[in-house]
Image (cartoon, rainbow, N blue to C red):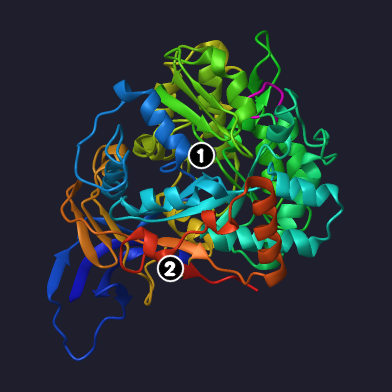
């Protein structure tokens, strides 16, 4: 099948293109224009349309135990289209099936679920396999677990940590490693309620700094393309920008990714003791070339916060709206589900809203700041089109600012920021840069040889409407969306890295699980056959 997408505005930052041009697709790939007067099987008139690669979301909680607990806790917040799918909760609430459709309708074709406890990996992959259209991946959580903390306590060398990280990646079929409130969640089990980067975890005698540095180095040395993905200590607390600055200063010469930085952008100035520290953070990020961040933008409305930072979620339980929550002191990180409604009239929420936009607008390089709401923590991912519009239109921002309390706006620099993102910068932040950050050279661009994940948008009066409802979306060359509605279902793959695993570590983990849990360590292995689809996984190359 040869498709000719003709005369669209090609926005492809990987190849520094923003021009009217053609795109040729043969089967699953973007190809060079065929010579010799070859005729396309289908010609698509893209004149007046914007053509981008499929969007890539690096941090969105779309599967796994916490997501399902949230569905159980809040059935009234969700409606399901009740289509058929396989895992038991895939039709409950905002269904697994719907997740894929809603992403595709916005032109997104790859999404990373960033927080899967290794013991839950099999279930998360089964659920991801039921999400139609998009490709997906998981990040496996380490850093509050007994094995890693025990290794550090015993003074284990870098090679042992590395072998364990490699074993975890291979066993769980993850694309990378995440650490959530490193050491702070383990300390919470000893009733420690406040934990910063240089505090010591009781019993294990290690600091957050030691955990983050050890995992950062291991991920780098294995050659995992995506750097260690860090959810810092002290999420949500006034004055916590200091924690983020300390973490950034510790990065030194290795890459590190900081998740949902907005939730760490808080100072203590003003009569309410809560203010934006986004300019300080943006300055630090601009200077630290090894650091990438995603924002975790807050938008007003009802949502539910779901996190494996059980310590933070326990502290936030009093703010639950509606007033119900689940806190699970589970293995390693556990999890907490706390519903929340962000209100435009709330001083606190309005500052949070502004902090996210300030970070987007004050961090100079769209290759290092990534587009997220930390779905669903800051807002559901369906809010993305409104956020694109806010970034691209300062008049629209002024309208939103007029809705929030003036005293809240005064605690931020947002009213003074005039920058407007271009389509090229939006494409960088949501296509080119995430492909590079995750090590996926086959996507995020429109060059010859690229995977034919393509989104066509129809510009109009409303930027949000353009991004909400893609004119056409192709996944692997298949037309899956037309005029904002899914027209064809197919299933994507899960992307994984598969580093070599040392035989001694494999035996050691067998012994550990047998002694500790009376279980074979294989119980958490994700067998390819379990997923029940043809070629459910695709291996991404390590970079050394
Ligand atoms: Zn998150």
Q: Nearer the viewer, residue 444 or 21?
A: 444
Picture quadrant where residue 327 is located: top right
Q: Is residue 37 above or below residue 166?
A: below
> Which residue occupies 19% across, 91% down?
36
What secondary structure prevails in the magenta region? loop
Q: Report the residue marked by disc 2.
A: 538
> Which residue occupies 47% across, 35% down?
66
Dot 1 or dot 2: first in sequence order is 1
Quadrant occupied by the C terminus: bottom right
Q: Is residue 525 left or right of residue 500?
A: left
Quadrant occupied by the N terminus: bottom left
Per the rendered image, the range of residues in magenta is 235-240
Q: Is residue 485 magenta?
A: no
Is residue 281 visible in the rendered structure shown here? yes
Q: Position of residue 469 (x, y in %)?
A: 24, 44
Task: For mark 2, give the secondary structure.
Answer: strand
Q: Report the residue marked by disc 1.
A: 419
CB within 8 Å, label 1 to label 2: no
Picture quadrant where residue 504 is located: bottom right
Q: Nearer the viewer, residue 328 or 35?
A: 328
């Amino acid at each position: 099948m040869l498709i000719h997408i003709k005369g669209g505005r090609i926005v492809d930052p990987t190849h520094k293109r923003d021009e009217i041009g053609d795109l040729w697709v043969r089967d699953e790939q973007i190809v060079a224009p065929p010579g010799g007067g070859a005729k396309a099987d289908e010609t698509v008139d893209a004149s007046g349309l914007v053509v981008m690669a499929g969007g890539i979301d690096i941090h969105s909680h779309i599967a796994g135990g916490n997501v399902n607990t949230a569905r159980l806790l809040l059935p009234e917040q969700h409606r399901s289209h009740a289509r058929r799918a396989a895992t038991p909760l895939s039709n409950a609430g905002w269904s697994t099936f719907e997740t894929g459709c809603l992403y595709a309708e916005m032109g997104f074709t790859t999404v990373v679920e960033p927080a899967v406890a290794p013991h839950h990996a099999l279930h998360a992959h089964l659920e991801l396999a039921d999400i139609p259209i998009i490709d997906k991946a998981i990040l496996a959580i380490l850093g509050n677990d007994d094995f890693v903390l025990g290794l550090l306590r015993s003074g284990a060398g870098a090679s042992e940590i590395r072998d364990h990280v490699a074993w975890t990646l291979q066993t769980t079929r993850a694309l990378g490693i995440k650490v959530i409130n490193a050491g702070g969640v383990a300390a919470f089990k000893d009733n420690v309620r406040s934990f910063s980067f240089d505090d010591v975890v009781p019993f294990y005698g290690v600091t957050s700094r030691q955990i983050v540095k050890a995992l950062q180095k291991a991920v780098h040395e294995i050659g995992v393309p995506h750097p260690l993905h860090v959810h810092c200590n002290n999420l949500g607390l006034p004055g916590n920008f200091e924690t983020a600055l300390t973490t950034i200063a510790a990065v030194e010469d290795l890459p590190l990714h900081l998740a949902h930085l907005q939730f760490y952008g808080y100072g203590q100035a003003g009569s309410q003791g809560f203010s934006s520290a986004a300019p300080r953070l943006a300055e630090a990020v601009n200077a630290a070339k090894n650091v990438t961040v995603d924002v975790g933008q807050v938008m007003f409305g009802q949502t539910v916060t779901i996190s494996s930072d059980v310590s933070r979620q326990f502290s936030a339980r009093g703010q639950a709206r509606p007033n119900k929550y689940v806190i699970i002191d589970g293995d390693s990180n556990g999890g907490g589900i706390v519903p929340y409604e962000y209100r435009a009239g709330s001083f606190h929420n309005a500052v949070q809203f502004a902090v996210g936009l300030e970070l987007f607008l004050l961090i100079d390089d769209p290759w290092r700041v990534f587009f997220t709401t930390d779905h669903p923590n800051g807002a559901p991912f369906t809010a993305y089109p409104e956020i694109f519009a806010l970034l691209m239109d300062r008049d629209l921002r002024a309208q939103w600012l007029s809705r929030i309390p003036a005293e809240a706006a005064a605690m931020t620099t947002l009213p003074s920021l005039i920058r407007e993102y271009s389509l090229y910068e939006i494409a960088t932040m949501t296509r080119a840069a995430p492909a590079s950050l995750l090590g996926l050279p086959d996507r995020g661009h429109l060059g010859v040889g690229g995977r034919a994940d393509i989104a066509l948008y129809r510009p109009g009066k409303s930027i949000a409407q353009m991004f909400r409802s893609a004119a056409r979306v192709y996944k692997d060359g298949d037309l899956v969306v037309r005029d904002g509605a899914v027209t064809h279902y197919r299933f994507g793959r899960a992307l994984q890295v598969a580093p070599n695993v040392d035989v001694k570590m494999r035996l050691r983990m067998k012994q550990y699980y047998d002694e500790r849990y009376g279980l074979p360590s294989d119980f958490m292995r994700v067998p390819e056959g379990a997923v029940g689809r043809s070629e459910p996984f695709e291996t991404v190359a390590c970079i050394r």
